[in-house]
Amino acid sequence: MKLITAIIKPFKLDEVREALSEVGVSGITVTEVKGFGRQKGHTELYRGAEYVVDFLPKVKVEAAVEDGILERAIEAIEKSARTGKIGDGKIFVTSVEHVIRIRTGETGASAL
Amino acid sequence: MLTWMKRLVASGAMALAIGATGVMVTSPAYADEAKKPAVTAPAATPATAEPAPVLCSEKCNKADTVWMMVCTALVLLMTLPGLALFYGGLTRSKNVLSIGMQCFMVFSLITVLWAIYGYSLAFTEGGPFIGGLDRLFLGGMTPDSVAATFSKGVVIPEFVFMAFQGVFATITCCLIIGAFAERAKFSAILIFMILWFTFSYLPIAHMVWFWPGPDDIKDVASLEAITARAGWLWQKGVLDFAGGTVVHINAAVAGLVGSYVIGKRVGYGKEAMKPHNLVYVMTGAALLWFGWFGFNAGSALEANGSAGLAFVNTYLATAAAVLGWSVAEWVLKGKPSMLGAASGCVAGLVAITPAAGFAGPMGSIIIGLIAGVVCLWGVTGLKKMLGSDDSLDVFGVHGVGGITGALLTGVFADPALGGSGIWDYVANAVAPDYSIASQLWIQAQGVITTLIWSGVVSFIAFKLIDMVIGLRVKEEDEREGLDITSHGETAYES
């Protein structure tokens, strides 16, 4: 079982959610985040004062998936989140040791 | 000497139906003024007899009365919530309530002081620099009391006149707080306002706006006699329709001095101090524009053609200033910003204020365009040169805009440029010999007097307060924000 953590452009969130649903991902967690990568920030000008905004708004999508659909899930995110311009984001994959569904106490794949 | 006398006659006669600046007051025909020696006997009244008092119930026009009450409420709207929103949006979110609270409290404080002694010292007869105590605690003022206007034989209720001038005093004081926003101690601000209102606002308002009214002007001798009883700058012939000197330059200098004496905000120049809500700024600027119709057109003191002209100029010059600022910003800085448009709006309103009843519509558009561009420089180039942390650019907008407007009033009041000229109350016509050069010099004297007077009063007041209770909050309080540390509340859920 793997945890996919994707940092994407905020306006791509709906497309990514749909693409993940199609490949069988049953749930995701979304967080609004800020950060920087290779995409530079921008400057804002308020009357005479100029401010450099380093941290840009992004969306972090987290989804725990079974190993069997991992590749398709990654591919779905890649395709749906890509614009080809700098700042499209990153996908991280980490191993998940254990999953428990709180309501029923189920564990493992059936808890997803 | 001859020129000077001529100037005095012509300029003393200024004002008037179309032009008129400021304000006059209590008609000499008041019941309680009848004891004063009559300068000229009204035609119908023998010099030996006391003139019959002018009663509001007989002389006031209902349309004028309604108009002036509506204008008074419009000017209140400029401060609450207009200015509070305009300033509040420009601060960081941790200080927005402190701005609102400062506006509310200063407004209320000055309102009460206005009734107790402010109105009397500004708008009753005294010396050339300050008025008298005839209206202390509004004593003797009844629903039948009247105040003169710029038209002979036209009066309005003195209660309404008092309230209208009162909201001017309050917004002037509230303007100042923007210069030292986000760091000044609340109690220090309130004490400063009492001192500054008493020693700067009241004298300047008296100097620029007080005159006994036109009703008794019959000939050159009576004109000179009336003019001699007016405020010092009025006697010189300074044209200030609605408060370029009295309100804007006066407040801006106080703010600038405050920003120097109080010092820069912690982290100024290193940390981002972005406006936290430009929608508030836009809303506030729009409310200021709306309320300013009362401020400028109401300064005609009657519902007449002069008010109509001031209304149109307030409409046109402001639009021109929005265009001027935005286009200049677009060309020079790359993008036209909402903050720029809102700032241009206020700059235009400030600049047209002294000229509102004097310039023609095309003159007002030019004044607006110039003010928009010059004030953009005021908040960028000039601000760097001044080197102080005038947080919300009170001097850059109100000082620079006020000076620009006060001087350009001298230019665009010229009938040759579509202006109203100066009214000659002896001939009952516009004076034929308008000179831009000499009027510019008179305007400059008004500007310089205000700059120096307000600057000195402010500096002394700030230094005194600094020695006694201190001007600033503690550094840790400033970092945490004045909303929670000075007022015990926060504007937003975090």
Image (cartoon, coloured by chain):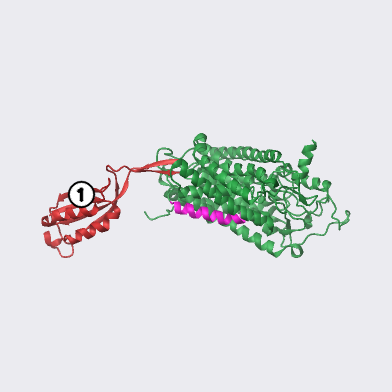
Name the subunit of mark 1: A
| Residue at left offset 51%, top offset 45% | B325
| Residue at left offset 55%, top offset 49% | B320
Amino acid marked by disc 1: Ile
Where is residue B303 drawn, in percent x and y? 68, 60
Quadrant where the N terminus of chain A sits is bottom left
Name the side, left or right, on which B245 lies relative to B270: right
Callout 1: helix, strand or loop? strand
Residue B50, placed above or below residue B254: below
Q: Is residue B353 visible?
A: no
Where is residue B221 drawn, in percent x and y? 83, 46
Q: Colour of chain A?
A: red
Residue B129, placed above or below residue B298: above
Q: Determine crowd level at label 1: few under 14, some 14-19, many 20+ residues with C-alpha closer than 10 A.
A: some
Where is residue B173 drawn, in percent x and y? 58, 48
Does the magenta run of residues contain B253?
Answer: no
Q: Which residues are magenta?
A: B277-295
Q: Please identify the dominant SS of the magenta region.
A: helix
Of residues B153 and B344, the one nearer the viewer is B344
- Chain in green? B
Where is residue B113 drawn, in percent x and y? 63, 51
Quadrant where the C terminus of chain A sits is bottom left
Does the magenta run of residues contain B280?
Answer: yes
Residue at which label 1 appears: A91
Of residues A103 and A58, the one nearer the viewer is A58
Q: Is residue B80 visible?
A: yes
